[in-house]
Amino acid sequence: MQIITLTTDMGTRDHYVASLKATILAKMPNVQIIDISHSVRPFDISEAAYHVRSCFNDFPKGTVHIIGVDSEPIINFGGSDGSFPSVLEVSGQYFIANDNGFFGAFLEDKKPEKLWRVDNILSVDNPFRFPAKNLLVPIAEKIVSGISLKSFAEPAIKFKRAFSQTAVSEPNLIKGHIIHFDTYGNVITNISEELFRRMGEKVPFTIYFKNKNYFIDAISESYNEVAQGEKVAIFNDNRLLEIAINRGANNSTGGAQELFGLRINDIIRVEFTPQGSRQTLESLF
């Protein structure tokens, strides 16, 4: 069955998601709709890219992803070079979004396999009214129907890139940032397991967050390796460093976000202390 995913900042309080899904099913009654997230912070295309990037590999080839965040196109208003609905092809899947920086944030440092721009948007009735529904869904319909992209879109090379923090490494130090809090209040960082392992195996380390009084000096394989209510660091399913409270959750017993007073973009530091080196906390903050 053909799968269409939705990622939006529309929330579920209003009628917008229902209208979007109804339009999809009216045009493509045999598709299966899967929600990735409708809780993206308003207009935050970097967060949208994080959610889609975190799970797209779990979907089969041919999946169509609609990203309805900051979807309104810009046609040379205010001296801008514009932004148009576009389609990115990656690993046999299709990603439909406004070229507002999403593609750059999603790809990170990778080059696009194929990118197409749909610039004939003024032929659509009311293209600026609910563009996720009136512009992006018709593109998905054409792809699902097997219509060739080159028949309604132009190949593109350039695309916008939203600013996003990247983890950096120095001798015996990794400096990363908090990029997301999940429902439990678990802290997701942009420090990858690959970058972490480059610093050497079995090298002692300390993970510092918020200030020098908050730290963890071990990576666990699971949350339950520590006692209930204790802080824990793991590499999650996406191989990103995560800081959590075992059995803790926001609005309940308290997750790491609430208990440590953390915020998006807060710095996370990992200091490695190989034999012969000396730890200097004061130099970190």
Image: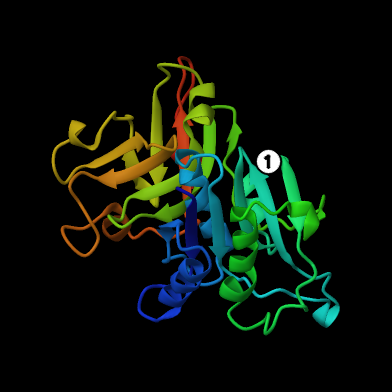
- Give how far across and how far down residue 141 sits, in percent: 60, 61
Residue 235 against residue 96 in the figure, above or below: above
Mark 1 secondary-structure assignment: loop
Q: What amino acid type should be assigned to the residue bearing mark 1?
A: Asp
- Give how far across and how far down residue 106 sits, in percent: 61, 49
* Residue displayed at 47% across by 30% down: 193
Is 20 left or right of 221, judged from the image as shown? right
Q: Disc 1 designates what residue?
A: 109
Q: Nearer the viewer, residue 107 or 235?
A: 107
Q: Nearer the viewer, residue 86 or 147?
A: 147
* Residue displayed at 56% across by 44% down: 62
* Residue displayed at 77% across by 78% down: 123
- Figure quadrant of residue 223: top left
- Figure quadrant of residue 145: bottom right
- Figure quadrant of residue 168: top right
Q: Nearer the viewer, residue 272 or 3?
A: 3
- Give how far across and how far down residue 195 sits, in percent: 54, 30
Q: Can I make out residue 280 in this image?
A: no
- Marks counted in the figure total 1
* Residue displayed at 40% across by 52% down: 210
Is 90 left or right of 202, judged from the image as shown? right
